[in-house]
Amino acid sequence: MQLPSKVLDEAIEAFAQLPGIGRKSALRMVLHLLKTSPERVEQFGEVLIRLRKELRYCQNCHNISGEALCSICSDQKRDASLVCVVEDIRDVMAIENTLQYKGHYHVLGGLISPMDGIGPSQLNIDSLCEKTGRGEVAEVIAALSTTMEGDTTLFYLYKKLKPFDVKMSTLARGVAIGGALEYADEVTLGRSIINRVPYDNHLVK
Ligand SMILES: [Zn+2]
């Protein structure tokens, strides 16, 4: 693509870094912004800067938060001894939308995937073990995708948490095998978390 301006090229390059956006889509966005009023574009830029500056991760559960503790962890009405382990923040949103769950979360920040070079040390697993080791957790509900990466991570967590004698359960299989959690409908996901099953049941003894 031959471009008439270096700034235009840089803008396209910046948008094309976003997931799922190729250079063609990036060009369409940039041309749209050029037709937008300078005030609106400035607002847009400010939102992006504030997003990165002001948001951080909850020090307890690694959910996105504006404060040291997220709104879920600082809610006294929620049960802190019940911890639902999820792959990422989109899963917290999906489960919250079911309105069925009143415990805490723990966001791993990914799944173990040797193919992609992601090992346990890159995920928020140590903090979960520490929390469990301090006796703060009575039950861990693993709400991970039923993919190979999800199952590998689940088994790893099971081994890591076993010494702490904590109850560990997984979602009832209303969630399709091979399915990503965020695509499950709210009713199915809500029922799956209520009818969760002990993880031991899945293991071949
Ligand atoms: Zn939190």
Image (cartoon, grey):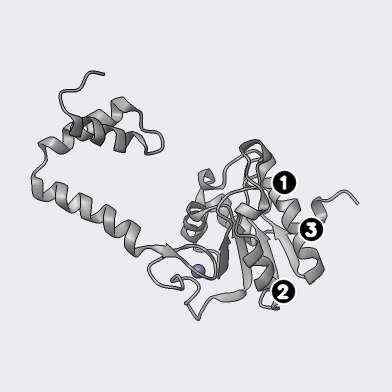
Mark 1 residue element: helix
**Cβ–Cβ below 8 Å for labels 2 and 3?**
no
Cα–Cα span, label 1 and label 3: 11 Å
Residue at point 37% right, 37% down? 17
Q: Where residue 44 sits: x, y (%)? A: 21, 50
On screen, residue 42 versus residue 48, left or right, reads left
CB of residue at label 3: within 8 Å of ligand 1?
no
Instruction: Give the amino acid at mark 2.
Output: Gly
**Cβ–Cβ below 8 Å for labels 1 and 3?**
no
Q: List the residue tagged with mark 2.
A: 133
Q: List the residue tagged with mark 1.
A: 152
Cα–Cα span, label 2 and label 3: 14 Å
Up/down of 83 relative to 39, above or below: below
Instruction: Give the amino acid at mark 3.
Output: Lys
Q: Where residue 188 sits: x, y (%)? A: 57, 50
Residue at point 70% right, 78% down? 135
> Residue 159 — which label?
3
> Residue 49 — which label?
none
Quick one: quadrant of the N terminus? Answer: top left
**Residue 125 visible in the current orientation:** yes
Q: Where residue 7 sits: x, y (%)? A: 19, 34
Q: Where residue 24 sits: x, y (%)? A: 29, 25
In this rendering, the count of numbered labels is 3
Cα–Cα span, label 2 and label 1: 22 Å
Q: Nearer the viewer, residue 156 or 92?
A: 156
Image quarter of residue 179: top right
On screen, residue 193 versus residue 68, left or right, reads right
Mark 2 residue element: helix
On screen, residue 175 versus residue 56, left or right, reads right
Mark 3 residue element: helix
Disc nearer the start of the sequence (2/1): 2
